[in-house]
Image (spheres, helix red, strand yellow):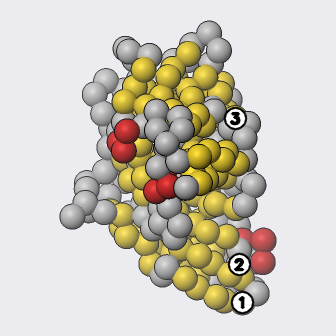
Amino acid sequence: EAQVTQNPRYLITVTGKKLTVTCSQNMNHEYMSWYRQDPGLGLRQIYYSMNVEVTDKGDVPEGYKVSRKEKRNFPLILESPSPNQTSLYFCASSQRGSGQGWQPQHFGDGTRLSIL
Amino acid sequence: AQSVAQPEDQVNVAEGNPLTVKCTYSVSGNPYLFWYVQYPNRGLQFLLKYITGDNLVKGSYGFEAEFNKSQTSFHLKKPSALVSDSALYFCAVRDYSGNTPLVFGKGTRLSVIA
């Protein structure tokens, strides 16, 4: 089954304790992205990656790191989490379509992070 | 810069009535437009997209969307709403060049009342 898998689904942790949220897709997609969803703000992009070893900042990259060493994996790293990073996080992937367009994104089921 | 506006935080409609969820966009080139739906405790699911061609796009679950270039709008519609359509709906846009990220609106919560 084609899917984007995020782990963990839920995490409660404390300020300053490094954490990693993993994201893996089994569709051989080139493009992967991380979003955070906050009430009243919709989805905001944190980082994205057009391909292996290529990553770019989105709208809200501060406090986050990513890496794309393999095509299927795109982990999100919070080196020193703070309470304002409490949010619902989504990973997504998509494939390049015909011409220069991109196919619709497939989303994971989300990771709810609470930073105390 | 690209942007999307969903002017309504909440839309309420009676079951069986037509529904419209509004979206306007801004993009420098030609737009590549999407609608996604989010059910509780789930990620976003793709509903439909517009690239070029027919201004009326048909998608999943009986939804359709009308692209209006002069009004820079891409409103989501359904002729007859179901209670099961109640969810959070997101409009998104990217420049068709494909080298810019997808930008989402803030979402509109649709409630269909029996």
Residue at image x 53%, y 67%? Answer: B40
Say which element carries label 1.
Answer: loop
Horizontal side, residue A77 vs residue A22: left or right: right
Residue at image x 48%, y 28%? Answer: B65
Residue A31 seen in this snapshot: no
Disc 1: which residue: A14
Q: Residue furthest top?
A: B70
Give amino acid for label 2.
Answer: Pro
Horizontal side, residue A3 vs residue B39: left or right: left
Question: Which quadrant: the C terminus of chain B?
Answer: bottom right
Disc 3: which residue: B5
Question: Which quadrant: the N terminus of chain B?
Answer: top right
Question: Do marks 3 and 2 both belong to one polypeptide chain?
Answer: no
Disc 2: which residue: A81
Calculate the distance from the C-alpha at mark 3 to the C-alpha at mark 2: 31 Å
Q: Chain of mark 2?
A: A
Q: Residue furthest left?
A: A1
Tell me where residue A36 sits by quadrant.
bottom right
In contact (CB < 8 Å): disc 1 and disc 2 = yes
Query: Label 1 crowding class (10 Å Cα cut-off): few <14, some 14-19, many 20+?
Result: some
Residue A82 seen in this snapshot: yes
Residue at image x 64%, y 60%? Answer: A37
